[in-house]
Amino acid sequence: TCALPISPGLARAHRLTHAALVLTVVATVGAWLLFAVDPGLPAELLGLVPADAGGRSALRSDLGGLLLAIGMLTLAGIVGSSRWLGPAAVVVGCVLLSRLIGLAVDGPSVVGIAATVAELGALGALLAGLFAFPHGLGVHPYHPAYQPLEWVWVPIHRPGLLRLFNRLVRLGTRLVPLPPGLERQARTVRAPDQHAIPVVQLRPAGATGPLPAIVWFHGGGFALPEAPHHRRLAHRMAQDCGCVVLTVDYRLSLDHPHPTGLHDCLAVLRDVFDSAEALGIDPRRVAVGGDSAGGALALASCLHLRDEGGPQPCHQLLVYPFADETGRTDSARRFTDTPVWNSRKTPYARALHLRQVVGTPPWDAVPGRAAHFRDLPPAWVETAVFDPLRDEGREVARRMAADGVAVVHHEQPGTVHGFELVPWAPPTQAALRARHAALRAAFDPAGAAEE
């Protein structure tokens, strides 16, 4: 299969939610159009007295109830953290209670009954989600600094909303200021189909001579763009490691499923080797890395370059990589409710990424299942403890070691997927120090030995 199984109950709830949304949208739009044409007409059709201001107030209240129900049903469908379910259920419950009191006092109306039914549906969907996926704060004792991440949501299973979300993310990334001591340059690389791939090059200001470099592929379930925290991490990596960092805006699975994104990443990596002198980069010290989906793209790129017999990176830095699609690991079964990313989101990411794949996915779409890892560059494989992808990363590190690859597996205690979103957290600081030390050692083994 190309995606994790979704429970039949949850799938049924989603279908009912969609149907309720359609009905409530149609009812609300129709009622408002009638109200715009003739303010008294809807009241007459609903049995209210046109001249009665209270009747019109009741109509407006009913329409407002429908709009609220639409919003809450949408929230039930897009919620990425169950922390949002409880407050939303309380709001809908209070409004539903006031609606029932209004119906008892003022008498029923068509729109009022429709609003009540919609609110009941919204409350049922929210409670079902809360019951099926309770939040895991008391179950998963990750570091307290990551508790705010329980409110983070990603609309991975709502393509229309995801497009809007991605636009906002891109805007936020462009607004991240460049810290002192760094230079930034934008360039493009041509993909095999001649698409212009945007690349941002960061380098220490005033640095001379060929510098080491890392080509970095951002995470985001293959469907989200580089986020502000990715850009800030790239800034810190360039500063801490004294290297060039090239971040790649590869095409996303929302419009370009596998293998387009991988082809973009490979094109940039090959171009860095071909253009190293012009870029002021030492071709012998070019590393590749990425987090989450970016980790999978980095690993798949190394496997392709190995098989082609061309130049290989000197090091690969894989941070909680996507490496498997079966969802059969212990961490995937356990972590259905962890912050930022959990195994409820994975099926939607896989469905977008692999929607053109028929049958078993190819190895470069799920590089953790490649035939072997022999002759790959040395690797740093980093996993988070409370992460559905944890066991995938552990298995990659285990297989690399078994195949003779020089690999270091680092797992920072107390961390969750995307822990870098809280840069001031002690586990984040410790993980970044270790990560950057490993990269410096890869660029300068002699200097690392002296340290």
Image: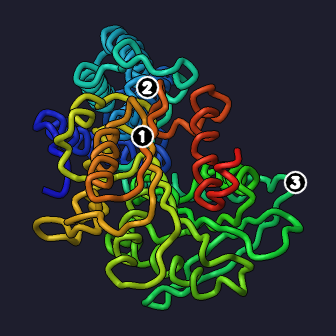
> Sequence order check: which comes first, mark 2 or mark 3?
2
Task: Tell me the amino acid under the disc marked 1.
Answer: Thr
The answer to whether residue 51 shows anywhere in this view is no
Q: Residue 335 carries which label?
A: none
Numbered disc in front, either 2 or 3: 3
Q: In this view, does 106 lie above or below 44?
A: above
According to the picture, the residue beneath numbered tag 2 turns out to be 84
Q: Which amino acid does label 2 sit on?
A: Trp
Residue assigned mark 3: 180
Amino acid under disc 3: Pro
Say whether disc 1 or disc 3 marks the residue closer to the N-terminus: 3
| Distance from Cα at disc 2 to Cα at disc 3 | 38 Å
Residue 291 in the figure: left or right of residue 391? right
Dots 1, 2 in contact, CB < 8 A: no
* Residue 223 visible in this rendered orientation of the protein: yes
Using the rendered view, name the quadrant where residue 361 is placed: bottom left
Q: Which colour scheme is used?
A: rainbow
Point out the tag, 1 or 2, that comes first from the N-terminus: 2
Q: In this view, does 373 lie to the left or right of 181?
A: left
Image quadrant where one finds the C terminus: top right
Circle 1 residues within 10 Å: few <14, some 14–19, many ≥20: many
Q: Which mark is residue 383?
A: 1
Query: What residue is rendered at 39% in x and 35% in y?
Result: 79
